[in-house]
Image: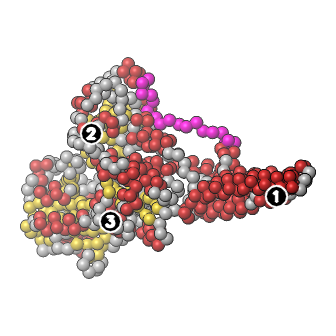
Amino acid sequence: MKNDSKHLTPSEQRWHQVDGDAALQSLKSRIHGLTEQEIAERLTRFGANRLPIAKRKPAWLRFAAHFNDVLIYILLAASVLTAYMGHWVDTAIILGVAMVNALIGFMQEQSAEKSLNGIRNMLSSQAHVTRSGALQNIDAEALVPGDIVSLRPGDRIPADLRLLEVHNLRVEEAILTGESTVVDKHARVIEGEAQIGDRLNLAYSGTTVSSGTAQGIVIATGTETELGHINHMLGEVKAAQTPLLEQMHRLGKGIFYLILVMMLALFVVGFALHAIEVPELLLALISLAVASVPEGLPAIISIILSLGVQSMARQSAIIRSLPTVETLGAMTVICSDKTGTLTMNEMTVKAVIVADESFSVSGGSYEPVGTISKEETGTEVSPQANLVLNRFISAVHLCNDSQLQRSEAGQWHIVGAPTAGALQVLAAKAGISNLNSPAIDKIPFDSSYKYQANLHDLEGERMVLITGAPDVLFAMAAQELSSTGEQAFRRDYWEREMARFAQKGLRAVAAAYKRVDLGATELSHADLRSDVVFLGIAAMMDPPRPEAITAIATCREAGIAVKMITGDHPETAMAIGAMLGMAHTHTAITGAQLEAMSDEELIPVAQANDIFARTSPEHKLRLVKALQAAKHVVGMTGDGVNDAPALKQANV
């Protein structure tokens, strides 16, 4: 563990491998915060907690840049020659095409910049810090390494933190890791190497606190954060030439050299052998040179590409430069993020398992539309008429801190954790939501014990309703509820059923209950050590987009390979890949395996495999480069900040 004055990035310092006390000591800080003098010194040394803003070129220069293109060079050269020859109509048409091309490109670029300029907006504007023993709200730009930051539900984390104290903290990290569910955080030491998504004792700038509270020490600010690292990678990525521009460049050079050789040869023949006067000979040579320039070709290509840009714009696809339209048709590989791109990014309950049978749940989004049917027969059932199913759904609805809401625009969304939200959608589909039974007392969810318990009046009885990790509730349960009443708990049955759905990439949440005296008003962990009755398991997933399944099949028919590059777990990635029709290998390549490979070793691996899991932004960038090194024209699609470097590197 280094203990010098130089500030290191999280990956260099291995902050997840040291405890909180060591982190405080390394950063020369203390739990009651830094002094004003220390803050001033560190602000001078490390700079403000913000990402650098590139100096924006003036509008006229950005417009002029659209003439810096091989196609446009040929057009302008042709216009000069046609003007010299007095063909003014041709000159006007050629210049008009060049001007229209520049205008379209400039307007499209303006729209694209608004869509792509979101990373700096990911940073928090305010931070709750402890300095000189006092809690303060400050501008997040004033944070320095060693500051003690407090986190509350709904906060956007203002800098990279090593967590010191955690209370039920759950963080949404999809923008960095691609994981579709919230992540439970803790403050314990993590041994060995760990990818970004596995560093559960760190919190990253730009991610959002879903629930719980915590206190952490700032380990990186501004450009040294993981978000800053991505921003830096974006700056290093060089724009690749499109196949069309490369071909036009070669064609232009070929025509230029051919004309030079031709004119030189004709000059020698005309002057030496036929004694033609030099002025007359030069005029003839210029005429031949003009005739040799295919001025119509770049004009036609520019017009066709412009029409393609407008056609894509009508399909809500922003094209920043004309040749990109042609590159779409030249793609040989498409790399895609999973969460929110191939999937809905909306956790959905797909099955419910109870003691007697299993049920399938239809519907693939937060919209509470769908049916519940018996898995074996497909027969639709009424949850209210099924004792066990009714009790299970009532439990997961009441013992739940999330809410299902509809916006003014008619869009359904979840307030709270996606997993808990999926259970609320299930309750709404079943028509069991909004039960009039407020919680009398509760034990909030905590990652240390992995369950939540609420005390409610339900069906004329006072009950403790419990939801949480299946293995934790298995250990509590003495009985289970079946259609014939309560019976002895069968752990082997439940573990088999849970394993069956886990193989499909589904995540599981269990529910149970316990009857208590009508006069009970308080809950404690000790109350859950006996007489707990197990109800069942909800199996859920972030479902694939139906249009993605069709698109992947179409790409494969066209000879275009599709590869999934995600930060999610390998099992989940493989299960989603199978549903999308792209899991042609038995295992997913992980980020840890990619790190062990050289760039040369990565090339055949990138070509041979379709699914890459637990990846970081660097891994995604390396995979795109490896495919390009194998002469592939690579398209990249994604919706997270973690996709940005790969998106910029890709041909499309």
What amino acid is labelled 1 in the image? Leu
The Cα atoms of the two marked residues, 1 and 2, are separated by 72 Å
Q: Do residues under tags 3 and 1 come within 8 Å of each other at their CB atoms?
A: no
Q: Is residue 210 visible?
A: no
Q: Residue at x 37, y 45 (%)?
A: 208
User: Split into 4 quadrants, where in the image is the N terminus?
Assistant: top left
Q: Residue at x 42, y 65 (%)?
A: 545
Q: Position of residue 143 (x, y in %)?
A: 40, 30
Q: Which residue is mark 3?
A: 585
Viewer-side residue, 48 vs 274: 274
Q: Is residue 48 magenta?
A: yes
Relative to 69, 462 lies left or right: left
Mark 3 vs 2, N-terminal side: 2
Give the label on residue 359, or none. none
Q: Residue at x 49, y 71 (%)?
A: 558
Q: Quadrant of residue 218?
A: top left
Span highlighted in magenta in the image:
43-61
Under circle 2, the secondary element is helix
The crowding category of the residue bearing disc 1, from other C-alpha atoms within 10 Å (few below 14, some 14 to 19, many at least 20), is some
Q: Position of residue 571 (x, y in %)?
A: 28, 60
Viewer-side residue, 58 vs 534: 58
Mark 3 vs 1, N-terminal side: 1
What amino acid is labelled 2 in the image? His
The Cα atoms of the two marked residues, 3 and 2, are separated by 33 Å
